[in-house]
Amino acid sequence: MTPKNIRVINGPNLNLLGQRQPEIYGYDTLASIADKCGVVARDLGVVVGFEQSNHEGAIVDMIHAARGTVSAIIINAGAYTHTSAAIHDALKTFDGYVIELHISNPHARDEFRHHSWISAVADAVIAGAGAYGYELAVRLAAEKIA
């Protein structure tokens, strides 16, 4: 495992951040969030990489590719949080630190969003902090893998 590497995996519709429902998700784009996290990561002496897919199998492949190559995964699985046993099972194969991330607070939204398949395999959950949650997650992951 390469020390001090963090992978941020983003699920469906997160490529539309800044455009889709900004009243819920804000105006930051995924690219601007990645840039801010890159600055935080450099300051903390870690490397952070961002990926996004709208496809469940591709997200499973990203998790598999992270095995043995990164020390922490930060995952915002979007709607797959509430539906994907496959992502849950893939995360169980990862032996590093896992942070589940949500821009909004799923418990303050539709009832179907109250259950997470990821929480059971995550070491930490960050929810409701907006786009800033990504920076918080990078800080937490950096501390845990130091």
Image (tube, rainbow, N blue to C red):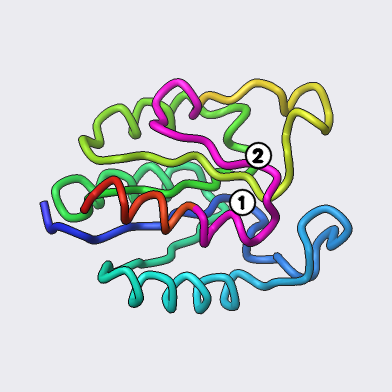
User: Mark 1 highlights which residue?
Assistant: 12
- Judge by depth and name the residue closer to the eye, 127 or 30: 127
In the rendered image, the residue lying farthest to the right is 23
Tag 2, which secondary structure? Answer: helix
Q: Position of residue 120 (x, y in %)?
A: 45, 20
Q: Residues within 10 Å of mark 2 (few under 14, many from 20)?
A: some
Q: Nearer the viewer, residue 32 or 126?
A: 126
Q: Which residue is mark 2?
A: 79
Q: Which residues are magenta?
A: 118-136
Q: Is residue 67 left or right of residue 17?
A: left
Q: Is residue 66 magenta?
A: no
| Residue nearest the viewer, comparing 82 with 100 | 100
* Type of the residue with mark 2: Ala
Question: How far across and down, in percent of the image, does residue 30 sit?
Answer: 60, 69
Ranked by sequence position, the earlier of labels 2 and 1 is 1
Q: Going 43% across and 43% down the picture, which residue do you hit?
A: 57
Image marks 2 and 1: residues in contact by CB distance under 8 Å: yes
> Circle 1 — which element?
loop
* 135 magenta-colored: yes
Side of 52 where 46 appears, left or right: left
Q: Name the residue: 83% across, 53% down.
A: 24
- Asked if 60 appears above or below 25 in the picture, the reply is above
- In the image, residue 125 lies at what x, y percent? 52, 36
Q: Amino acid at mark 1?
A: Pro
Name the residue located 34 percent from the left edge and 33 percent from the top edge. Answer: 91
